[in-house]
Image (cartoon, grey):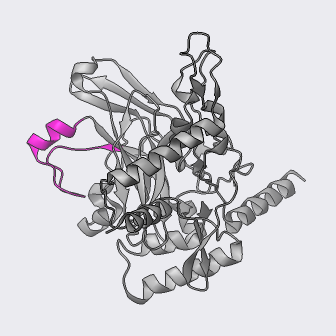
């Protein structure tokens, strides 16, 4: 191929990575122009009310093998300090931010582990109609919360760590800030506390959320969901773990996002750690086929706690409530190719870069900088092209909140 064709392919690859938002029109997704960057809303956790429960150990042993497989066996973990939601609890105020939430996602997700036949088509068609009616067409991700009081996902932020004065902090680098602000954050709704014991890490506190609220809002009959659980040696469901493998993964914990997720056809979700955020744990990356696979349970993240050589008995790892748990990044499924450019293309691109530097660079103000050095920091940040991410709660959840508010006012009167 000639240089012109190679440049054309490069332009197409760039366009595919910066694709516009998608909207439902009729029965299909169509591209829309990207909205202007919006102000990042602070993380917010709706007020939660739960009834104390001394128990909390899951009854997964009483379930049939098929039922446990459908739920993904998340019910075997939280037996210490477990708390339960009240199924009648409602949030006192709306979340601070406005990805689109739809009741159809739970219907499509909880009905089967994979789409099948007329039921799946009917659920997808119902979801399309609801999304059009709710005006949430710009979203490239649809979600449904397991409980109405659990937090919505949040737009990612440019800065997560407030640094003291000084130059050279990673948060001052425009490309790093852009990476940190790309995608949505899953908010941790409950404090997670892990203690290092003699036999390894243990869950110090756990929460089990009952499925009554989801049943009231959707009609499906879900299983109660623990917020975290660990692998077990010789476990069979949801998949077998051999003893020699367990030794290598014993520091992993599965944490529920309490979110059912759906993306447009051809789009998947990269679930990964928060970019550039150093913590006492890290999130293993996974690519979710959320455009066709809808499990009957909410998606979960897998976190890795420190290895034995980097921890000692009595150490704790705490993930506070309201903190970002993991990142969701939309990715377009396709065939990508990396091809080395020839010398003519390189010279052309290099000269373009030098022309930009000459046009927008300004003399460096640092007295120790080499003579003639140009500073491009402000010019680069000003011309940087940022993606925009939003969160739009569903109209049905807003109506439920308003109805609960009216009921409370009537009770007070």
The reply to whether residue 323 is visible in this rendering is no
Give the extent of the magenta segment: 229-250
Q: Compared to 56, does 320 lie above or below?
A: above
Q: Nearer the viewer, residue 157 or 102?
A: 157
Tell whether 390 sits left or right of 257. Answer: right
What residue do we see at 64% from left, 62% from top?
Answer: 34
Residue 221, position in %: x, y?
47, 69
Q: Is residue 300 magenta?
A: no
Q: Nearer the viewer, residue 345 or 147?
A: 345
Q: Nearer the viewer, residue 385 or 408?
A: 385
Q: Quadrant of the N terminus?
A: bottom left
Q: Compared to 404, does 229 lie above or below?
A: above
Residue 25, position in %: x, y?
62, 81
What residue do we see at 27% from left, 69% from top?
Answer: 66
Tell whether 225 sits left or right of 336. Answer: right
Q: Is residue 249 magenta?
A: yes
What residue do we see at 48% from left, 67% from top?
Answer: 262
């Amino acid at each position: 191929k000639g240089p012109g064709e190679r440049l054309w392919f490069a332009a197409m690859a760039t366009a595919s990575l910066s694709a516009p938002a998608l909207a439902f029109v009729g029965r299909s997704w169509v591209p829309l122009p990207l909205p202007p960057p919006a102000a990042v809303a602070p993380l917010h956790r709706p007020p939660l009310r739960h009834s104390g429960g001394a128990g909390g150990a899951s009854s997964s042993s009483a379930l049939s093998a098929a039922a446990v497989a459908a739920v993904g066996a998340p019910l075997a973990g939280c037996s210490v300090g477990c708390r339960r939601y009240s199924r009648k609890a409602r949030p006192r105020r709306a979340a601070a931010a406005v990805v689109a939430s739809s009741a159809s996602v739970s219907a499509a997700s909880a009905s089967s582990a994979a789409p099948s036949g007329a039921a799946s088509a009917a659920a997808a068609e119902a979801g399309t109609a609801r999304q059009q009616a709710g005006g949430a067409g710009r979203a490239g991700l649809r979600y449904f919360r397991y409980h109405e009081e659990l937090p919505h996902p949040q737009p990612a932020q440019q800065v997560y760590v407030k640094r003291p004065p000084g130059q050279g902090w990673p948060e001052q680098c425009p490309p790093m800030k852009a990476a940190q602000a790309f995608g949505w954050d899953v908010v941790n709704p409950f404090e997670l506390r892990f203690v290092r014991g003699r036999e390894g890490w243990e869950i110090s506190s756990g929460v089990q959320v009952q499925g009554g609220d989801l049943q009231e809002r959707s009609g499906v009959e879900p299983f109660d969901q623990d917020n975290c659980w660990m692998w077990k040696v010789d476990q069979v469901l949801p998949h077998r773990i051999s003893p020699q493998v367990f030794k290598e993964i014993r520091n992993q914990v599965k944490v529920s996002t309490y979110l059912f997720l759906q993306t447009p056809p051809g789009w998947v979700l990269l679930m990964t750690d928060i970019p550039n955020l150093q913590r006492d744990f890290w999130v293993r990356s996974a690519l979710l086929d959320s455009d066709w696979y809808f499990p009957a349970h909410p998606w979960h993240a897998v976190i890795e706690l420190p290895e034995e050589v980097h921890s000692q008995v009595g150490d704790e790892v705490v993930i506070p409530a309201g903190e970002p748990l993991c990142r969701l990044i939309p990715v377009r499924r396709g065939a990508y190719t990396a091809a080395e450019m020839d010398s003519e293309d390189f010279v052309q691109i290099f000269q373009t870069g030098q022309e930009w530097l000459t046009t927008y660079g300004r003399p460096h103000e640092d007295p120790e900088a080499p003579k003639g050095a140009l500073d491009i920091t402000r010019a680069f940040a000003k011309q940087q092209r940022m993606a925009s991410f939003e969160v739009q709660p569903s109209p049905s959840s807003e109506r439920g909140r308003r109805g609960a508010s009216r009921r409370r006012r009537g009770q007070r009167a």
